[in-house]
Image (cartoon, rainbow, N blue to C red):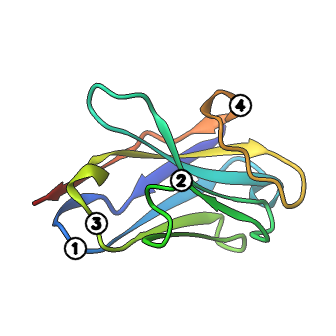
Amino acid sequence: QVQLVESGGGLVQAGDSLRLSCAASGLTFRSYAMDWFRQAPGKEREFVAGTSRGDSTRSYADSVKGRFTISRDNAENTVYLQMNSLKPEDTAVYYCAAVNAGLGVVLRRKEVMSYWGQGTQVTVSS
């Protein structure tokens, strides 16, 4: 069965960096666009960043543009989220998600994602 397993979350101070990883198994990874979403307490799950199946296209939420970088290693079936200059408002559970999509396509709507990981907590203190 398909599994997406996130890691790398933790408690950091404002201005610090973290790198999240999401290891995928049970699917043809290179055929899937991969996204990161996050959900803060009492808020809806929101799109953070996405990469197309060949990593030719990357898309970011305005709130993280210039601070976060998504990347993927299709040989390792892993997608990453490098988070720099973290702010307290970045505190959330971060989820990776997969959707079968065409070349160069990034999908940003959580409703269309096919698979989800269990999430990893990121807490940024001020």
Q: Mark 1: which secondary structure? A: loop
Mark 4 / mark 2, whichever is N-terminal: 2
Task: Residue under label 4, please give it.
Answer: 112
Distance CA(mark 3)–CA(mark 2): 15 Å
| Quadrant including the N terminus | top right
Outermost residue, front direction?
A: 62
Find residue 85 and report its horizontal and vertical position in percent: 30, 73
The crowding category of the residue bearing disc 4, from other C-alpha atoms within 10 Å (few below 14, some 14 to 19, many at least 20), is few
- Numbered mark located on residue 15 in the image: 1
Mark with earlier residue (3, 2): 2
Q: Find numbered disc 4 in the image and state the secondary structure of the residue it sits on.
A: helix
Relative to 38, say whether 77 is above or below.
below
Q: CA distance from mark 4 to mark 1?
A: 33 Å
Q: Position of residue 13 (x, y in %)?
A: 14, 67
Label 2, residues with CA under 10 Å away: few <14, some 14-19, many ≥20: some
| Viewer-nearest of discs 4 and 1 | 1
**Residue on which disc 2 sits:** 61
Which of these two is toward me, 87 or 69?
87
Q: CA distance from mark 4 to mark 3?
A: 28 Å
Answer with the quarter of the image where residue 124 lies.
bottom left
Give me the residue at 48% from left, 38% from top: 46
| Circle nearer the N terminus (1, 3) | 1
